[in-house]
Image: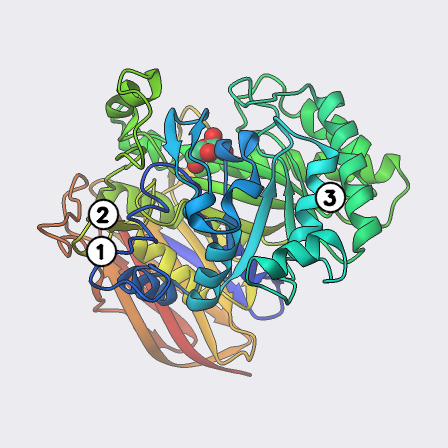
Amino acid sequence: MRASVTANRDYPIAKIDDRLYGAFLEHLGRAIYTGIYEPGHKSADKNGMRKDVIGLVKELNVPIVRYPGGNFVSAYNWEDGVGPRDKRPTRLDLAWHTSESNAVGVHEFADWCDAVGTEMMLAINLGSRGLDHARNFVEYVNGPTGSAWGDMRKKNGRSKPFGVKHWCLGNEMDGPWQVGHKTADEYGRLANEVAKTLRAFDKSLELIACGSSNSDMQTYPEWERVVLEHTYDAVDHISLHMYFANRAKNTAEYLALNAKLDAYINAVASTIEFVRAKKRSRKKVTISFDEWNVWYHSNVQDREILSGAKGWPEAPRLVEDIYNFEDALQVGCILNTFIRRSDVVKIACIAQLVNVIAPIMTEPGGAAWRQTIFYPYLFASLYGRGEALQLSVDSPGYDTQVADNVPYLDIAGVQDAQGGTVTFFVVNRHASETLDLDVRLQGFEAVAIKDHRTMAGVALEATNTLKRPTAVQPRAGTGAKLKDGRLTARLPPHSYQMLRLAAATG
Ligand code: AHR
């Protein structure tokens, strides 16, 4: 089977925002406790943070991390997590039916972000709390000393403002499961007032209003229209979430799901345009896709804790999906979609980063390792920065429940900012056929294949575990050729490849 692609240097989609490779950490299960924070661990730094995990997060070059939730944030009191540790209260976490010790709060998280070299993106509780809480929290984090909140921060060990730029105005407020769930009108009005108030404090903040929790919500996409009509002038981004699952064990359908993601982005981008036109506004609100990943493997085992049958356990194993090779292919397709829609998606956060539906797993007192999905995320984060290319793709396809003629070839192309490399991220969705890929390179003088990695030839169910942490990992690719302005490569059935070319612009 053949697939042909044309990549022309003069046809870019957009400059990719580095924040497309963000991540998310919630006070949920073992994401924080025994995930990033484990004071007794042999690799712990002076703050109790695991250096082995810091190393893996650094490897991923994560530009921004959303925190502290998620559903957790909708009943969270940020004040519980500041000040002397021995005075911090233990609270019941109503979102996940667990106990929260508050040993980690915004100060500890900020130190961890510094150690990792990433930026904080903080979510505000607009579920159980409201406007006053929002302004106090932002002033505590970013305000000057000499006022009550800034002085309190100083007393708690940090004189200099944290300077957090990105603020999420609540989390999944459309969801009936959310503490403080609201209608679109109720939320839109509140988010607008909060945004206005925060802007009175600092005009330069980037504010993110809640969009839909997924595109199957009954309120979608009307939710986006109503919320944006309330908030358009006051916010910068609208947030979307989507999780992928293969419950029916149908790989062909599963790997086509990014067509649904694409339609979701398209509908919300069109809604933004509709509201913009209605408001006669020149401003462009963009999408913050601040929760995305595969999530289904752990659903059944989590029922007991979520039902309350285990009481209120502290940092239990919860929402710990063990990813297989099929999921790595899926994550490759999702990231390709974000690159292709980098004209409107400016922030995206893999949900989550450690232990909880995460590319990184840890054993308490033991090792940390990379899940299968670590690798497509790694390659996109390292080499998917620069300008996304508008590729012309001619590939055979197949019909699915979510879309017709889904191409067997899923591909995204990125030219780095200096124009010195062109990288292709490629998935062959076909179960049994090799795809002969032929890429015509126009306007580039591709001089060499700089790097070629492949993930192929392993069972779709194969996983990485504590005992076998490297069962699924990329290998050096072979057989790709560059000749007369054409890149050719053989893509085995169910495979992922990253092909990086050194290129001079011609
Ligand atoms: O990431 C897990 C949960 O998924 C988050 O807490 C919530 O926002 C979403 O429903």
Residue type of the residue flagged with mark 3: Arg
Does the closest atom of ligand 1 sit within 8 Å of the Cβ of label 2? no
Q: What residue is shown with label 3?
A: 135
Of pointers 2 and 3, the one earlier in the residue sequence: 3
- Outermost residue toward the right in this view: 280
- Residue placed under numbered mark 1 in the picture: 368
Q: Is residue 151 left or right of residue 338?
A: right
- Tell me, for residue 451, which label it has, or none: none
Q: Compared to 118, does 211 lie above or below?
A: above
Give the image location of residue 86, x and y in percent.
Answer: 41, 47
Instruction: Tell me, yes or no, if residue 23 can be seen here.
Output: yes
**Mark 2 and mark 3: Cα distance apart in space:** 53 Å
In-front residue for pair 7/245: 245
How far across and how far down the image is residue 393, in percent? 47, 52
The residue sitting at 70% across, 47% down in the picture is: 207
- Point out residue 327 in the picture as x, y percentages from the top left corner: 29, 42
Q: Can you say whether 336 is above or below 90 in the image?
A: below
- Residue type indicated by callout 1: Ala
Which residue sits furthest left?
Answer: 467
- How far apart, in angstroms, are the residues tagged by discs 3 and 1? 38 Å
Residue at 86%, 50% (x, y): give it.
Answer: 282
249 sits to left or right of 190: left
Q: Quadrant of the C terminus?
A: bottom right
